[in-house]
Amino acid sequence: MLILGSCRKDDLLTSTEADTSENPDWSAATHGIVTDPDYEVVFPDDEVLRIDITISSDNWEAMQDDLKDLLGSNWGGGGPGGGGLSSFSSDPIWVECTVEFNDLEWNHVGIRYKGNSSLQSTYSSGNDKLPFKLDFDEFENEHTAITDQRFYGFKQLSLKNNFNDKGLMREKVASDLFREYGIPCARTSFCALYIDNGSGPEYYGLYTIVEEPDDTVLSSQFNDGSGNLYKPDGDAATFANGQYDEDEMELKTNLDVADYSDVESLYEIINSTDRTNNTESWKAALEGIFNVNHFLKYLAVNNTIQNWDTYGIMTHNYYLYNNPDDGLLTWMPWDNNEAFQNGNNGGAVSLSMSEVNSQWPLISYIISQDEYKAIYEEYLEAFITDVFTTEKMVSLYDEYYYLLRDYAYDERNGCTFINYDNAFDDAVSSLKSHASSRVNAVASYLD
């Protein structure tokens, strides 16, 4: 029996059942903390995983009521103020669920809704395919039997709903391209999600499982995962002069120390008058706090694939990690489901970035330096030569088309972004055309 009450983020729903014998499937490899998370099981490239989630009807209702309170509108109501996006006053509530995978169960797992536009726009349009976040030991204080519970070594996982992606593969393809080119980025996999909220299992569609940066990305993609990790969001995320706000530089690690001096130094240096008065000194200072070379490499990938919903147009969807190996803040892309298209809000950033102004100084001030621009262009050429070739991308899209097609067309009305008969096919065809056009665009720019 579950006890419910009026709750917010820190007022969590818990079970009153005893802790003992609640995890008959527990093993060190599947449910315990392990040195090396099992990436082969959780993040395969060549299969669609099936995950079943069971949530009590009371907990499900509590999630819906909470989301309605947060968004200020009913499901399908068009959003607050006739459709505009609002900022959450807090995260959606956690409730308990059971996760089933590979004939094993994980009990008392925390689940909540997640996301910004992927959540709000989907909700306001009356679409059931909402994004979730899982935390496998969220309720360990209430259930000692799940202390330090993990999912093949992972504490948290995001279940992204492939918002605005009729091809259902943009998030995975973009993330894999970043990592292949040496840019740390969360691993991803495809997942058929089934949810039982009291009426039996129901297919909620093809989701993308995404690794959480503050969980395992740092330890697996850096030699030392003990540095500060920031998730900027809001005006301060631009790093524009006069916009620094510590509250918008969300610190995800080392909260006990809460030392923001590294990211504040980057803000001060990028906006320093030395940029025009003493350029070499400015560059030396910048390179002493920010991994400029890495950022230029990131820009080469991001601009080629037209990943528009991030820095340069939008004030979110990236992380900064202070890598202890070199003491430099290192750029990490995040939330890549809007890649491979020209984009909204004026379109994706151009290859030259000439239109980017001082509102985005990490681009405009850096790329205005001839030395940095030359490095960026070298990365562009190498990317379309070694990684993002037309032949390779067309082959990859074909592979994923056949892997995902049945799952895509099995999505039910009202719980999908595939809104006409051939939408998935057309989306994959568009991705193939986009690859060819972007390779040609980069070659033309460099000519």
Image (tube, grey):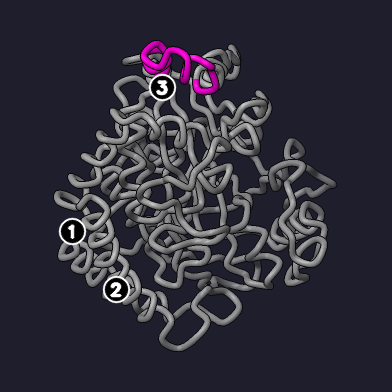
The 10 Å Cα crowd at callout 3, few under 14, some 14 to 19, many 20 or more, is: many
| Front residue (pair 357, 80) | 357
Marks 3 and 1 close (CB-CB < 8 Å): no
Disc number placed over residue 290 in the picture, else none: 3
Residue furthest right in the image: 6
Residue type, label 1 = Thr
Q: Quadrant of residue 154?
A: top left
Disc on the earlier residue, 3 or 1:
3
Give the x, y percent position of residue 210: 43, 49
Circle 1: element type: loop
Check if residue 133 falls in the magenta segment.
Answer: no
Whichever of labels 1 and 2 marks the residue nearer the N terminus, that label is 1
**Magenta: predominant secondary structure element?**
helix
- The magenta stretch is 270-286
Under circle 3, the secondary element is: loop
Looking at the image, can residue 357 be seen?
yes
Where residue 175 appears, as percent x and y from the top left, is 35, 49
Q: Is residue 103 above or below residue 245?
A: below
Residue designated by label 1: 389
Q: Nearer the viewer, mark 1 or mark 2?
A: 1
Q: From the viewer's perspective, is 336 left or right of 197?
A: left
Q: Residue at x 40, y 11 (%)?
A: 281
Query: Which class describes the residues within 10 Å of circle 2: few (<14), some (14-19), or many (20+)?
Result: many
From the top left corner, tell me how far across and down residue 121 is, in percent: 65, 63
Question: Residue at the location (44% across, 67% down)?
Answer: 206
Q: Is residue 351 above or below residue 331?
A: below
Does residue 65 sit above or below 415 in this rendering? Answer: above
Query: Mark 3 or mark 2, which has the lower sequence index?
Result: 3
Relative depth, front residue between 391 and 284: 284
